[in-house]
Amino acid sequence: MLNSKSVGNKISTARKKMNLSQADLAQQVSISSQAVGKWERGESMPDISTLNRLAEILGVDLNYFSETFKSNVSESQFEATKKQSEEISTTKLKTTLGLSWNMSSGNWVDADFSGLNNLKDKFSTSNMKNCKLIDSDLSNLILKSNNIIGCDFSNSDLRNSKIQTSNLDNNRFIECLLIDTEFSSTEIKNCNFSKANFSGVELKTSELKKCIIEDAVWNLATFKLSQISDVVFNGTIEECSFENCSFTKVTFKNATLINTFFKGRKLKGIQFIDCHADRMTYEFLKNGKANLTGLTLLA
């Protein structure tokens, strides 16, 4: 038998024994750190496939998460798994410390940087056109005042990145991990984000226009003071928020909205087609004078 509070406490205990932060664990499970926090507080619970993955990472048996389980995992087992994790991290650190290059303030055209890693802030204030950064580890990337046009970031890891005061036009972010990524004061136009993971993403004082975001993952995403136009949302949008945003020709199609917050009086630019929402989300939209045609309440 599983109990969310008990499971959360056990995740927290095993994580701390492994000297992993919530962000470290989130990265290995490919979710947001906020989601790990909710697990550990007992506010939600991982599904069975995620519990299997957690058991592997934390060096425990799957039965460990049961209320009736009495741990047979010895300290030596924890220490062995912890040591292995530290050895892998040390190897990565030794690899990255040797890199001293910096490609900021450059003009890059038709360059292929696919498979690159450890970018951090080494592309700031640059112009990039028709470049490839496919299958790259771009986590913790910092882009400031960049002009990026026609580039391909498909299948890359951009989690925990900060993209600020930049122009993104006609780029491909297909199947990218954008977990906990922050876009601020940035124009995002004509980009393809199909199957991207937007969990925990924050878009503030930015513009999202004419972008493709089919089959994307939306969980704990936040939009603040941003302009959203000519965009179609589908799938499950859960625990997201749209605060004082401007909507123009925005469509939610075949979408399910759960615990999603809409604040502001500029919701008339939203259209719903075959959508469902829980009561709270429905009332937020109703209070904002949104046209609720095409939106029905979940049973």
Image (cartoon, rainbow, N blue to C red):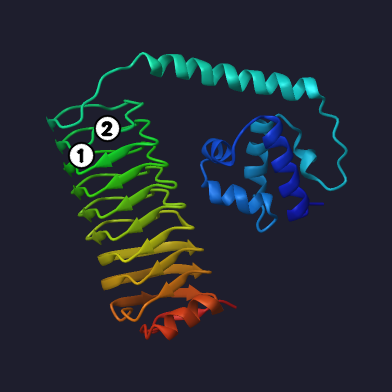
Which residue is disc 1 drawn over? 151
Name the residue located 49 percent from the left edge and 15 percent from the top edge: 91
Examine the rendering and report whether any part of residue 275 can be seen.
Answer: yes
When asked about the image quadrant of residue 241, the answer is bottom left
Q: Which of the labelled discs sits on residue 182, or is there none?
A: none
Q: Nearer the viewer, residue 190 or 137?
A: 137
Q: Amino acid at mark 1?
A: Cys
Q: Is residue 224 above or below residue 185?
A: below
Using a 10 Å C-alpha cutoff, classify the residue at mark 1 as few (fewer than 14 neighbours), some (14 to 19) or many (20 or more). many
Seen in the image, is 132 located left or right of residue 136? left
Q: Which of the labelled discs sits on residue 133, or is there none?
A: 2
Q: Secondary structure at mark 1?
A: loop
Tell me whether the residue at label 1 lies in contact with that at label 2, contact meaning CB atoms closer than 8 angstroms. yes
Examine the rendering and report whether any part of residue 214 can be seen.
Answer: no
- Residue 184: x and y, percent? 30, 53
Seen in the image, is 192 located left or right of residue 281? left
Q: Secondary structure at mark 2?
A: loop
Q: Is residue 207 above or below residue 12?
A: below
Q: Amino acid at mark 2?
A: Leu
